[in-house]
Amino acid sequence: MAEDTLFAKIARGEIPSEPVYSDDEFYAFRDINPAAPTHVLVIPRKPIPKISDATEADAMLLGKLLLVANKIAAQEGLEEGGFRYVINCGEGAGQTVFHLHLHVLGGRPMLWPPG
Ligand code: AMP
């Protein structure tokens, strides 16, 4: 069930996490295994398993997801050095938790293309 994923439980406060941002629709917390000096995960409280499952009804939510990420990037002081947003979609892309999440990565140079 989408409501039973690790991140759904983290969003409900049933599993501990290090909070970075919270509002009615979104929760953001530090990645437990950071891939950069700053690595924050932003999740909608609504349990959408992966980005390709989003529908027209989620258009506003997806826009707000990016705006919340922008707030976090600014709050974390990432604007000057640059930062990257990542959404992995499906196991082949490295998605391991099937509750939509956006990675905010910064604090080091970002390689292109990504590995
Ligand atoms: P993805 O591979 O895109 O599905 O991203 C899942 C991310 O969740 C990985 O970067 C993990 O390090 C991170 N992660 C897994 N468990 C936890 C946890 N309990 N608290 C914070 N981050 C976690």
Image (spheres, grey):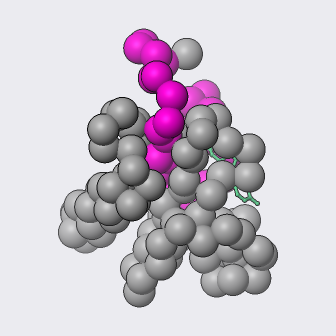
Residue at (45, 23) in percent of width and height: 110
What x and y, as percent, mark residue 9? 70, 76
Image position of 36 (left or right of 42)? right
Q: Is residue 74 visible?
A: yes
Q: Nearer the viewer, residue 29 or 92?
A: 29
Residue at (22, 69) in percent of width and height: 60
Residue at (71, 69) in percent of width and height: 17
What x and y, as percent, mark residue 91? 63, 35
Q: Nearer the viewer, residue 98 or 115?
A: 115
- Of the 4 image quadrants, the one containing the C terminus is top right
The answer to whether residue 110 is above or below residue 4 is above
Number of residue marks? 0
Q: Nearer the viewer, residue 59 or 36?
A: 36
Image quadrant where residue 98 sits: bottom right
Image position of 33 (left or right of 104)? right
Q: Is residue 63 magenta?
A: no
What x and y, as percent, mark residue 35? 64, 35
- Of the 4 image quadrants, the one containing the N terminus is bottom right
What x and y, as percent, mark residue 105? 49, 40
The answer to whether residue 65 is above or below residue 10 is above
SS assignment for the magenta stretch, majority? loop
Image position of 112 (left or right of 47)? left
Q: Which residues are magenta?
A: 90-114
The answer to whether residue 110 is above or below residue 15 is above
Image position of 46 (left or right of 56)? right
Residue at (33, 55) in percent of width and height: 74
The answer to whether residue 109 is above or below residue 12 is above
Q: Is residue 103 magenta?
A: yes
